[in-house]
Amino acid sequence: MSEENLEVVRRWWASFNEQGMPSLDLCDEQVEVRNPPAFPVRGSYYGHEGVRQWRADVFDVIDDVSVEAEKLFDVGDGETVVMFLRLRGVGIYTRIPIDETWAAVWTIRDAKLVHAQGYISRREALEAAGLSE
């Protein structure tokens, strides 16, 4: 199961990078995506419509956006994945290049994303998942 969960997360970001939209087939109908408060795109998004809105909000503030999965961890509980990511793009209004690292904790059930919580700090994400650096 753990490799399957890692693959769901990889495929989610691959579809985001390749098509500009995460695959909704990988999302539970009640999915929740939560960004950290310090992100340019803030708040929580619910369901498939929420994922669409999250994507629109990201593209409203960042141009040429891509997200690279730098490292993935299976927590070992059968449903939790921690991911270290790198966001690249250009600010829509400032035209300043963006190259930021961040992290996320994902909950996967039945090969579907149920919950994703973003963190500015990789350490915070590991602690939230019950791991340490």
Image (cartoon, rainbow, N blue to C red):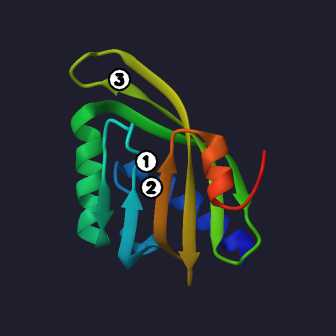
Q: Quadrant of residue 57?
A: top left
Q: Which residue is mark 3?
A: 90
Q: Quadrant of the C terminus?
A: top right
Q: Is residue 65 above or below residue 11?
A: above
- Residue drawn at x 73%, y 72% as measured from the top left: 2
Helix, strand or loop at label 2? It is helix
> Is 19 or 67 nearer to us in this picture?
67
Mark number, residue 15: 2
132 relative to 8 in the view: left or right: right
Q: Nearer the viewer, residue 87 or 122?
A: 122
Identify the image quadrant of the N terminus.
Answer: bottom right
Q: State the image coordinates of residue 51 (x, y, percent, origin top left).
A: 31, 61
CA neighbours of label 3 inside 10 A, class few (<14), some (14 to 19), many (20+): some
Give the CA distance from mark 3 to mark 1.
17 Å
* Contact, mark 2 vs mark 1 (Cβ under 8 Å): yes
The alpha-carbon separation of the residues under discs 2 and 1 comes to 5 Å
Say which amino acid is labelled 3. Answer: Val
Foreground: disc 2 or disc 3 = 3
Residue that numbered label 1 is attached to: 18
Q: Which residue does the image show at 58% across and 39% down from the upper left?
A: 121
Decide if residue 25 is on the left or right side of residue 46.
right
Amino acid type, label 2: Ser
Name the spot of residue 115 as percent of width and height, x first.
47, 68
Q: Quadrant of residue 69?
A: top right
**For the residues bearing labels 2 and 3, Cβ distance under 8 angstroms:** no
Q: Where does the image place residue 78, in percent across and percent down from the top left?
A: 70, 78
Secondary structure of the residue carrying numbered label 1: helix
Q: Amino acid under label 1?
A: Glu
105 over 99 or under it: above or below:
below
- The image shows residue 109 at horizontal and vertical percentages of 56, 80
